[in-house]
Image (tube, grey):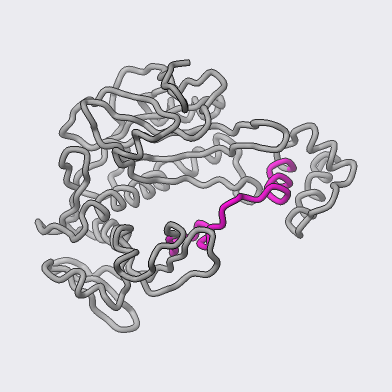
Amino acid sequence: MTRTDQAAEHTISRARHGLKARCPVQSANLYARDYKPVTSVVDHVLFPPRHTDPCQHRSDCVTLESGADLTLAGTRPYGIIPLNQASDYLNGTNIRLRGLLNRHLTLPGYPDVRIHPNRVGRFEETGTRGGYLNLPRTLVDAAQLGWPVKLKLSGGSYGLDVGGQTVPDENAVGPRAASAYLGDLLDQHLTVAVREATGITPALIHWEPSAWAAFTPLLQRASTQAVLPTPDPTRMYAAVSFLPEQRIDSYWMIVASLSAVAIPSVNGQLTIPISDASPSPSGVLRLVNSREHFLTQVRAGHAVTMLVEIPRNLRLTADMGIINVPERTLIVRTAGPQSSR
């Protein structure tokens, strides 16, 4: 281990144990030289995130808006159902809730699906509450066991049916099921490869892939976006994007991110929300046609995206369905008066 690495390890150890005061001279030099293993940890300690997430990105926990009611009325827009009300909620479908200690969902003719009870919390508030069914996540798990779980598309809205029956609150459950599916798609096809391509170390850099569904009003409000023509309005699409790490100034850094966004087609266009900051100094985003080319661009430190199809049947396949569109450079539009860079 070199002296630089030893000094970095010393700084990281101090940061993890609550470093609040001035760093040692060696560590200050490393910080001033923008030595990434030091700057990422020290920045996180000295400049913690403004917003408190009680779930801390745990997979078995969902964070709602601050002040949200944690009863069925407040959680159902998120597809989160109190377990003691799940049977009534699912009434009218063939899906049943069974079991007392080990809960599971049943559908005639298909394997039972184990329920892993979720906890919920609210932004800016401490503590979480348990005993909830994450219905979109559980139905995506069910699809992997062969359940006939299918996405529907009506204009810019996603719905969901199971065995030909519409799931309640389809405008909430459908998009969130698409997000859960995309999260699995990232895990299966890209997360590990992108970590290796960028040298991202989970213990040092607070980065993890994310997946979500973009609603039309949100797309219209997105401060940074790229626009593509829709290849086929009858199909469902998502943009899988990588944005490299950016240092805004000596005190603020945007960490690298990998995300998948389910995008409805509106007026023949797919609007890709990027982030609140330009993804690269030149304000461009490279559109590629293959996983291999995607990783090549990631290694080069470029902002990159590719268009994938979301299948109606939410079963993961061996291949990521990448849409073969002409490779090009997208001009990213930013906040304020929409203009190209």
Which residue lies at the image location 51% right of the left edge and 29% below the top edge?
298
Residue at the spot x=34%, y=24% of the render? 227
Tell me where residue 126 sits by quadrant.
bottom right
58 magenta-colored: yes
Tell me where residue 28 sits by quadrant.
top right
Q: Is residue 235 above or below residue 202?
A: above
Q: Nearer the viewer, residue 272 or 163?
A: 272
Residue projecting furthest to the bottom: 100
Give the magenta part as a residue range.
38-62
Above or below for 230 versus 120: above
**Which residue is painted at 15% across and 71% down in the image?**
91
Report if residue 255 lies within the magenta region: no
Q: Which of 73 and 13 is in front in this view?
A: 73
Residue 339 at x, y percent in the picture: 43, 18
Q: In this view, does 261 lie to the left or right of 207?
A: left
- Res 248 → quadrant: top right
- For this orientation, the residue located farthest to the right is 25
